[in-house]
Image (tube, grey):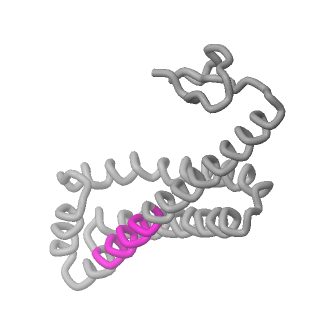
Amino acid sequence: MTPTTEPLARLLDEQLAALHRFVALLEDERRALLSNAIDALGALAEAKSRSAAEIERFAPRCRDLFARAGLAPGTAAVDALAQRAGERGRVLAGGWEALQGVARKARRLNHENGLLLAQLRGHNERLLDGLRAAAGAPRAVYGPDGRSVGDAPAGSVLLVA
């Protein structure tokens, strides 16, 4: 491999391992959401934040390695580096493809989990609204900044623009 491709291949391997750990957390979150294990969600959210921060720390190192090769980060740059490295460049290209595949899976899982969370939140809001209405309690109204802007009768709109 060329002087740039060797460290980049190692970096991609490290990043791929970190991304696999992130995907595992997303899968744990999905199982918790589907099994209504709400108590586990807080710890999973913290673990996901730490894992995402770990993944973010790879970006400057990756950009630096691409810059040393005179290329902008991305698939075209990996292809160019892989061609320069000849036979050994396949390792780099394979690592990049694997990373892209796991990143797509992470995005999909994160999106699906977000939809599940929104469903759960909506269900909980409807339950609380029903309990408040049964108790005759007013329903709080919140503005876009999340601050209470007063009380409103049951059945009113929750958000004010």
Residue nearer the viewer, 112 or 128: 128
- Residue 160 to residue 8: above or below: above
Across and down, in percent, residue 87 comes to 23, 85
Q: Is residue 111 left or right of residue 122?
A: left
Task: Tell me the quarter of the picture where residue 18 sits.
Answer: bottom right
Q: Is residue 5 left or right of residue 69?
A: right
- Residue 106 to residue 135: above or below: below
Q: Is residue 121 left or right of residue 62?
A: right
Across and down, in percent, residue 82 comes to 22, 73
Across and down, in percent, residue 123 comes to 65, 51
Task: Tell me the quarter of the picture where residue 10 sits.
Answer: bottom left
Question: Would you say the magenta stretch is mainly helix, strand or loop?
Answer: helix
Q: Residue furthest right?
A: 135
Reply yes or no: does residue 98 show up in magenta: yes
Task: Please report the bounds of the magenta region as a residue range.
Answer: 93-106
Reply yes or no: does residue 33 show up in magenta: no
What residue appears at the point 28 percent right and 75 percent down from the top-left corner?
Answer: 93
Image quadrant where one finds the N terminus: bottom left
What residue appears at the point 73 percent right and 42 percent down from the top-left corner?
Answer: 130
Residue nearer the viewer, 67 or 149: 149
What residue appears at the point 71 percent right and 54 percent down from the top-left corner?
Answer: 41
Across and down, in percent, residue 25 comes to 63, 64
Task: Tell me the quarter of the picture where residue 138 sits.
Answer: top right
What residue appears at the point 70 percent right and 65 percent down from the top-left corner?
Answer: 32
Residue nearer the viewer, 160 or 27: 160
Image quadrant where one finds the C terminus: top left
